Image: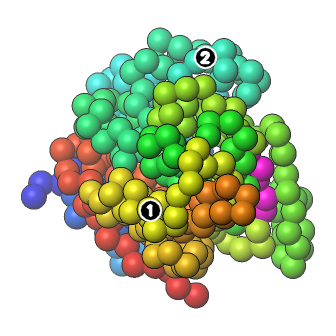
Amino acid sequence: METIPVGLVGVTGYTGMELARILAVHPVLRLARATSRTEAGKPLSAIYPFLQGFMAGDVRMTEPDAADLAASCKLVFLAVPHGAAMDYAAELLAAGLKVVDLSADFRLADKDVYAAWYGLDHRHPDLLPQAVYGLPELYGPAIKKTRLVANPGCYPTSIILGLAPALGAGLVETDGIVADSKSGASGAGRKAAVPTLFCEVHDTFRAYNLGKHRHTPEIEQEVSKIAGAGITLSFNPHLLPIDRGILSTIYTRLTREATVEEVHALYKKHYADNSWVRVLPPGKLPETRFVRGTMFCDIGLVVDARTGRLVIVSAIDNLCRGASGQAVACANLMTGLPLDTGLHLAPLMP
């Protein structure tokens, strides 16, 4: 099969690094351009020695240039911070390219909600209606047809997939939902900062941004669509002393009595055609180590009859399923490839 050249803007962050890892062995998507202002001129293998011996490792990093990307690529991944991605996306779309944006710039449909949570006016609000939220289990057919994908956040991926079957079936109430989530330190990005230094993260555990994390409106937007009603939930993130992985424990109230076997059957049926969502047997709960480096979202279910709650536990890899792998899945659909092309990834066990 003829390869499809793709570009990667922002290759030096953790999501850029993970994209390079996945694209290095992708059978169709070929990394043709990788951009970095600070590392321009160097081959990728100079900063990522694990790419030595792969064609992707020979790609020389360049300064970001829309004209060069348009001449060299069919699709471009944007692994740059919010605020910067929207301008790149506008230029690349105008040049006829397809774009997968890993930032938050196109995830929120309402420009006013974006401005309120990100402290920045959206400079290209005309593009917001064109963007499709890149969660294949929810929007696969629309992703195939779009030129602009808003790649989901890592926390939202774990929470939305966990809640979707129960909310869609009306099994849980739409108010009082609490999502208690924990992420590895790579979720904070690769930029040097005191709170994520080794000695600040190792051998401790802390909560952060309670009640104000920027993924909150993204989660509420998507679960409200599933439920067909406005949902305000409590999202509480924590930092784990591990490199990668997210574990979300989601507390809901049942609308009726149900056994764990009934709920398990509902979830199995809901995700019957989605091989990346593994609904664990009753009595089993997910662990981050079993999804590390993969596209899997493992879901465990607990019915607490005493309190009338359904407790949902989901685990994903924040860098792969929660970012770069999901971006490649969307790119597969956008370029006419099967969803799982190049994404049969075994767990990265320690």
Q: Is residue 150 visible?
A: no
Can you say which quadrant of the picture contains the N terminus?
bottom left
Quarter the C terminus occupies: bottom right
Q: Nearer the viewer, residue 203 or 70?
A: 203
Label 2: few (<14), some (14–19) or many (≥20) C-alpha neighbours in 10 Å: some
Residue 50's x, y, as percent?
48, 77
Residue 228, compared with residue 292, is above or below; it is: above
Q: Residue furthest left?
A: 1
Q: In front here: 232 or 190? A: 232
Q: For mark 2, what is the residue?
A: 111
- In the picture of the structure, the residue carrying the numbered disc 1 is 262
Q: Amino acid at mark 1?
A: Glu
Where disc 2 sits, the SS reads: helix
Can residue 214 be seen by looking at this rendering?
yes
Q: Quadrant of residue 340?
A: bottom left
Residues at badges 2 and 1 in contact (C-beta under 8 Å)? no
Give the x, y percent position of residue 59.
39, 59
Predominant SS of the magenta segment:
strand
| Relative side of 299 to 203, left or right | left
Say above or below: 102 vs 189.
above
Please tell me which residue is depicted at 46% across the width and 76% down the height of the picture. 281
Report the magenta residues as a range: 235-239
Of residues 100 and 157, which is closer to you in this image? 157
